[in-house]
Amino acid sequence: MILGLFQYVFVNKREILMRDFFGYLNWTEPLNGSPDNLHSAMGDVSAGIKKHHYVPGEKFHQFIFKYGVLQNKISSEIETSFTYGNFAKSNQLVIVGDILLTQLQLLASDLSLSISEIRRLAHEKIIFLAYQRWGEECVYRLYGEFAFALWDEASGRLFCARDHIGIAPFYYINTNKSFIFSSRLEDLIRHLVGSIDINERYICEYLVGRWPNSGETVYQNIQQIPNGHFALVNKHGLSLQRYWNYENYLSRKAVIGQDEESYYRNTQEAVINAVRDRLDTKRVGINLSGGLDSSSIACCAALCEKERTYELTAFSKVPLPDYMGEVCNEVEYIREILKHHGQFTSYTVTDEPLPSQNNYQNYFNNCATFPFLPFFTTGLGLSAQIKKNGIMTALSGEGGDEFLSNSGSGVPLLLAKSGNIYQSIRLVYLFCKIMNKPFLKQYISMVIIKYLGERSIYLRNILIGKPHWSTLGSSFIKQKYMDLYEFNSGNILDVEGSGKSNSHPHFAMKAVLQSGCNQMIIENQRGVDSMFGYTTRYPLLDRKVIELCLGTPAILFFNNGWKRNLIRESMREIVPEINRLRKGWSPFSNSFASMMRENVMFVQKMIKNEKNELAWKILDRERIQTAYDNLLNSTREDLEAQKMAIKLSQCIGVVSFLAWLQTKGSNR
């Protein structure tokens, strides 16, 4: 048996920039000689890591483990900061991973530690202590953003786990002879050169609007541990087990609950703790758009700054006046946050890098998959500013829309269907009063038309077996693949939902949690992080925050006529009133139609590349070209053109990725 575990950490002034890991487990080849021979036997692997990750002036941190003896190859400068290596050796355990544990106060008492004691421990050591006490069941007690592999010499097995959402990546190749894993797809692709088979279904599901399976990747030969799962690997094979199930936390009070204030207090406390636990470096950046999600994170971080010394810096994207004909200026709300919390340093970015093949190539080299968010390049100016300021951790509001700040727009319909007609009318009336809209028109729109729409989709699904066109969208996939994967049948609605479940706020949460949605979004951002050398953290995707949202009665998401009511009420006395009670939304990105119109040269280059056989095997190039010509001739007020632009931009991202992959020797 050969086992190699590599942990590499980039540091700057003893602060962690990024963590990555790689491991190789071979059950069939005997180990010959010294650890140096082991390193030699894995020379192509270790050389690849150095090639991908070495940056002049930064440190390379490597573990090699052999039959219970840990060979710790680590520079003396870093060794004082990472004492868990010696701890692992003495207990015949070793761990590698990308680990940030949160809500430590919940774990401290179970481990007979005080809060101050557990906060001083390296998070790897906390997992060792938990594993020694509870074995693999320790993962049930872990909160945070983590993916790790722990080798237990006594039992001869590898224990691997991934957090509840899948924020930290864990990819692997599993065969009868070996188990290879990494936090980076590009490390594993090196083992597939000459035999890279794309997962065509994965791509097609993304393009028709279904979230691909959370255990798959764009490569047939590479899987990932699904969110909320752990894996046990030994010579008999691999077994996966779910440890976190969102169904266990769904509110039993489906619509109306008592003691509203307790829900708001508990949510506020959970969000503050989630932000505090992610302030893991002295300099922290906040992606501040002026919206309620990012404003809440910024204000909670400012509260935590009073407890300990952090240097908080806000980074905001403010487009130039009339940029691409769009209006999305958040300056008023951003300034209010900065004025309310004077300790922020702030930077704004006004230029928007246009998509280019160089940007995409750089992204693919760092992420090795297609960008989930079309035209991800609109955020590169912000990322460059974060890098320029030496920020190592940036906090994002991702996940707010799906969970904490769920709009709850279906609650009036849900109340009406459950017999609470008075409550339904009351909420719509209060909403119209706040938004200055006509009551009758809004009630018809929010309740009656939605109800009839649900019934029509439901009946269509039963009688015809086909999804509603708005669910499927305008697809450019060749009919062969539409038929092969049965995208023309009613199973599309298995994920998108049908009938009365649509009106419940928890539906959006369930749809996200049972799919790979957030994983793909975060995977996209991780590629950008890798390009610019920092780490993005996600407080609103904290497990404790999500569990509280799942247990909150539906009405509290749209109480007193306020959409996004749960976050509004939870952030009282924390977020300035002008931000907390704003009536509009935060349009952080420009419209896809404008981006497609402004970048004709780039888009045409992608479409006209006839040599991209991987792309045109799946996609219909002529239909894409026709649709793009129609888009260029449409007006800015054409809503159908806006919808079409989203699909087109997704296609362009996939086409560009497959062109890059074809150069890697992919099989068709």
Image (tube, helix red, strand yellow):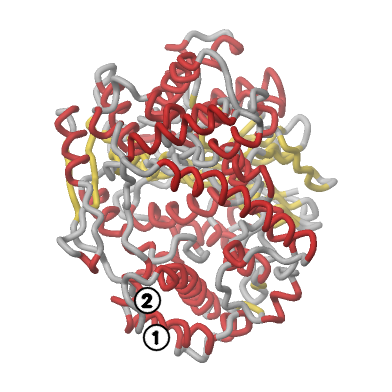
What is the CA distance from the residue labelled 1 to the residue labelled 2? 9 Å
Q: Amino acid at mark 2?
A: Gln
User: Which label lies toward us, 1 or 2?
Assistant: 1
The residue carrying mark 1 is 605
* Dot label at residue 331: none
Residue 423: x %, y % from top left: 53, 27
Name the residue rendered at 35%, 41% in the picture. 11
Is there CB contact under 8 Å for labels 1 and 2?
Answer: yes
Name the residue rendered at 73%, 52% in the picture. 26
The residue carrying mark 2 is 357
Check disc 1 and report its element: helix, strand or loop.
helix
Residue 285 or residue 423, whichever sits in front: 423
Classify 567 as above or below 502: above
Q: Amino acid at mark 1?
A: Lys
Disc 2 crowd rating (10 Å Cα; few below 14, some 14-19, many 20+) is few
Residue 254: x %, y % from top left: 64, 28
Q: Is residue 180 visible?
A: no
Residue most extreme to the right: 236
Residue 488 or residue 102, whichever sits in front: 488
Residue 463 or residue 232, whichever sits in front: 463
Which quadrant is the C terminus positioned in?
A: bottom right
Disc 1 crowd rating (10 Å Cα; few below 14, some 14-19, many 20+) is few
Name the residue rendered at 44%, 16% in the picture. 265
Classify 645 as above or below 493: below
Residue 110: x %, y % from top left: 61, 12
